[in-house]
Image (cartoon, grey):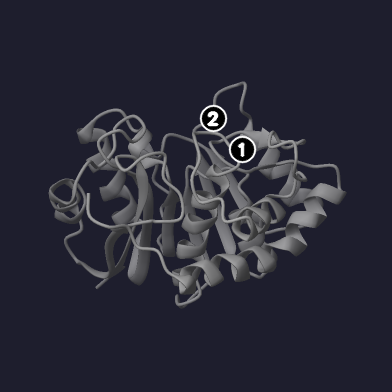
Amino acid sequence: MSTPAFDNDELNMILVTMEKMKSVEHRIIEGGMEFSHISGILYGVDEYADLSMSFTEIVERLIKKNEFTGRENTGGHYLTKAWEISKVLYWIDRTTGNKLLNIGGGSTIINFYLASIGYDITSIDCCWAESDLVENEKMVADKLELPIESVNADFIEYDANAVFNAVFSICVIEHIETRERQRLFIENMARHTAPGGLMLLTFGYGNKATCNPFRNEKEIDSLLYAYLDGFDIVEPFYFNGFWSISNEHTWGFVAAKKR
């Protein structure tokens, strides 16, 4: 693997993003509600017990302590999630129009934040009974009066009968079990992207990344870029240097604009 991207500009971008999200996060927490921090799990009391339950505060404290390495499901995992969110928000800030589609991010803080600043969010997630992210998202959106349409569906088989100004998915595609289903997932993201709109994708990367990752840049070309006919790559693939499980397990990002 080549040297990961890591610079102070992105570090500052993460801190700015955390500050922006605090308001809606506090409304959720103060209302006794829950949201998903990482890994599709709802948290009422954070598992990283020496910090508060606030996602934004966890990230800020980890950065101040220079804790950029960690293991799966430790506090360090929050840094990579913050990096992914920050990358997506950077590009959403540069879209025209306010219709957004998030795939696999039910009850995530990014949905509640974007809805709180005026975006119309469609959120699609495929939930099992023990992880009722869609119903929780509906409840939070209703109580906070946020414009979020939450759908429990397999996105590969989903047709919104609409297109969106930005379509994004954070750390989902590597959990799709076959390359064929990954192809269908990417093509459906592309189909739901409006002309001039953005498709934003983060994912596990490396030989030892979770489940079914892209393992090298050749696979990025053949298993991702190859299915983006009609798109221009506006931010080419690179992987993050804020947090990695090992030099063979990190996270990547790609942004593409539909012609």
Amino acid bearing label 2: Cys
What residue lies at 72% left-to-right and 37% top-to-bottom? 46
Give percent across and percent down for residue 181: 26, 34
Give percent across and percent down for residue 143: 81, 50
Which residue extends farthest front? 65
Which residue extends farthest top? 129
Give percent across and percent down for residue 49: 74, 36
Amino acid bearing label 1: Val
Q: Which mark is residue 82?
A: none
Q: Are marks 1 and 2 in contact (CB under 8 Å)?
A: yes
The residue at which mark 2 appears reads as 127
Of the numbered discs 1 and 2, the one sitting upstream in the chain is: 2
Q: How far apart are the two marked residues, 1 and 2, measured between alpha carbons?
A: 7 Å
How many marks are shown on the rendered structure? 2
What residue lies at 77% left-to-right and 35% top-to-bottom? 45
Disc 2 residue crowd, few under 14, some 14–19, many 20+, Cα 10 Å: some
Give percent across and percent down for residue 247: 31, 43
Side of 119 relative to 258 (left or right): right
User: What element does badge 1 sit on?
Assistant: helix
The residue at which mark 1 appears reads as 134
What residue lies at 77% left-to-right and 57% top-to-bottom? 145
Q: Quadrant of residue 64?
A: bottom right
Side of 143 relative to 158 (left or right): right
